Image: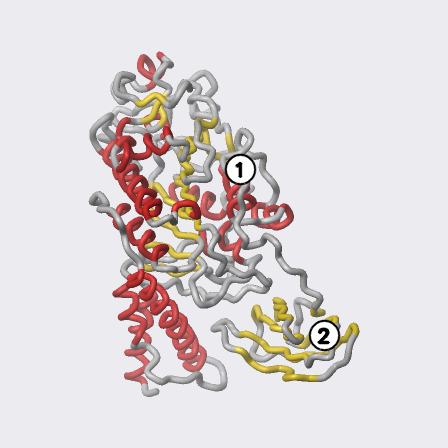
Amino acid sequence: MNRRKFIKYSSAAAAVSASFSLGKIPVWAKNIDLDHPDDNVLVIIQMFGGNDGLNTVIPADNDLYYSKFRKTLNIPKTKALKLGTTLSYLNPALKNGKNEGMFGMFKNGNLAVIQGIGYPNPNLSHFRSTDIWLSGITPTNDAERLESGWIGRYFNRINQSSEHPNCLNIGSSSSLLFSTGSEDVGISVENPNDFYERGKDLLSGESFLTGSGGYVDERNFLLDLSIQSNKYSKVVKSAFDAGKNTTEYAKGKLSDELKLVSRLISGGLKTKVYLLSIDGFDTHAGQGTTEGKHANLLAEISNAVSYFMADLKAQKLSKNVLGMTISEFGRRPNQNDSNGTDHGAAGVMFVFGEDVNGKVYGKPFDFNNLDKNKDFVHQYDYRSVYDEVLSKWLGSDGNTTTQILGKRFDKVEGGILAKRSSILLANEPKNSSSVYPNPSSDGRVILKTFVDSDEPLTVNQIDNLGRKLPILQNIKVGRGQIEIPIQLFGKSGVHILEILKGKQKETLRVVWV
């Protein structure tokens, strides 16, 4: 490849990177079948800017809301939507959409409304607090780096087929949510057709160069990226072409994104987690009440979510989809002098789906229990919701959830979700094989395995592109416990060993440091 071709190749790969997260997509090392038709999908909607929870779920029976804290920036009780027999009311904008929007979903038992969600010692920086929510880690100080997301760490514990992306961010950039700290477990897509066109012509019959350093490393990295881009672009495009939508969606960016997600699910894409976003919630000025900036944003969410769930239900796909909203923080109890609200602490979270225990969780915002900064005190740690989603929806066991979140968190008032879990970690077969040392300092390990038949033993190494590199082929070893020395191909990183013993297949993750 000459310099001109290399520059052209690099530019093309860079263009794809606008729709493809740059981290390598790993093949994880546990025997879990993710092609099961009952597997669950999680959709996360990020409300960037800090949503005003107080004007989203309103304590309309509390006179202090009207007389002291929100004298002009309030939702009149006559227009607020009472949530069952509780003391909480929903912003009327959340009645927009299919079948009375998210308010209708609440009445049907498919929407959980969580008041007072947050974390201890809240950080009121947009980007820092967003990282905290995406990482699932509350740092001990502002200097602590947050380098992985709770979803990334989850997928670091399971095996995912390399044929479909684990996670998909609807947008142009990668997200901390999908980072393991060293790799990404997701891709970013704005338009499947554009993604496909950008990815299909990158390979041009090129092959990896031997050697290392400088040009060789950069060129091989670009080819590696291009191969993965090409593979996933075909899968996403195929699902998009095969899928359909059964209803007309309202206009708006979030509606377009959820319409795309529904079509990809309908088309058979086996992605497990989707991330979408809607911004504009940093309402320091001109926030509005039942009309205006904030109401329009809530109406857009209600429209998008209600049509999305109706679309899935019409295709008999809604049972396997769970959605949740996140926002980096709430707003202060007091309105400011610009008819807006400033950065605050505790906020509101929605969780929606057919397996949700739909009701109001927590007490209305309490104006008599403010912290030293005159902010609302959080009632629930946001990680309580993550804990339950991991264990009940994604099938994570207790030890795995502890490793992902650092510790276990109590459920929100007995639980938001029905007792139903994905098969991702459920009924996981147990390996009879292991390797040591693991990690290995030089790529040399000892494979220890039990052979209970006269069938030959085959050991393959699977690289990050899903290619099999033969190590041992059809070796007769006899029955019983055996140990075999193995030298890994390649260089330091995460490697996968596939052990075949007759009809039995096991996979092991090996780290070469």
Q: Secondary structure at mark 2?
A: strand
Question: Pointer 2: what residue?
Answer: 446
Q: Residues within 10 Å of mark 2 (few under 14, many from 20)?
A: some
Cα–Cα span, label 2 and label 1:
41 Å
Image x and y of residue 31, in percent:
59, 63
The residue identified by callout 1 is 384
Determine whether 266 is above or below 72 in the image. Answer: below
| 366 or 231: nearer the viewer | 231
On-image quarter of the N terminus:
bottom left
Q: Position of residue 374 (x, y in %)?
A: 43, 23
Q: Earlier in the sequence, mark 2 or mark 1?
A: 1
The quarter of the picture where the C terminus appears is bottom right
Element marked by disc 1: helix
Question: Height in image: 173 above or below 407?
Answer: below
Taking the image as shown, residue 161 lies to the left or right of residue 97, namely right
Mark 1 belongs to which amino acid? Ser
Residue 142 visible in image = yes
Relative to 471, 415 lies left or right = left
- Residue sitting at x 36%, y 72%: 230
Tell whether 110 sits left or right of 384.
left
Find residue 272 and report its image quarter.
bottom left
Label for residue 347?
none
How many numbered marks, from 0 up?
A: 2
Q: Amino acid type of disc 2?
A: Ile
Relative to 392, say whether 426 is above or below.
below
**What percent of the width, then of the height, locates residue 118?**
47, 34
Q: Mark 1 packing: few (<14 Cα in 10 Å), some, or many (20+)?
A: some
Q: Which residue lies most toward the right here?
A: 480
Q: Who's the residue at 52% across and 74% down the image?
A: 463
Q: Indicate the quadrant where residue 204 lies.
A: bottom left
For the point 43% across and 25% down, the residue is 375
Asked if residue 71 shows in the view, the reply is no
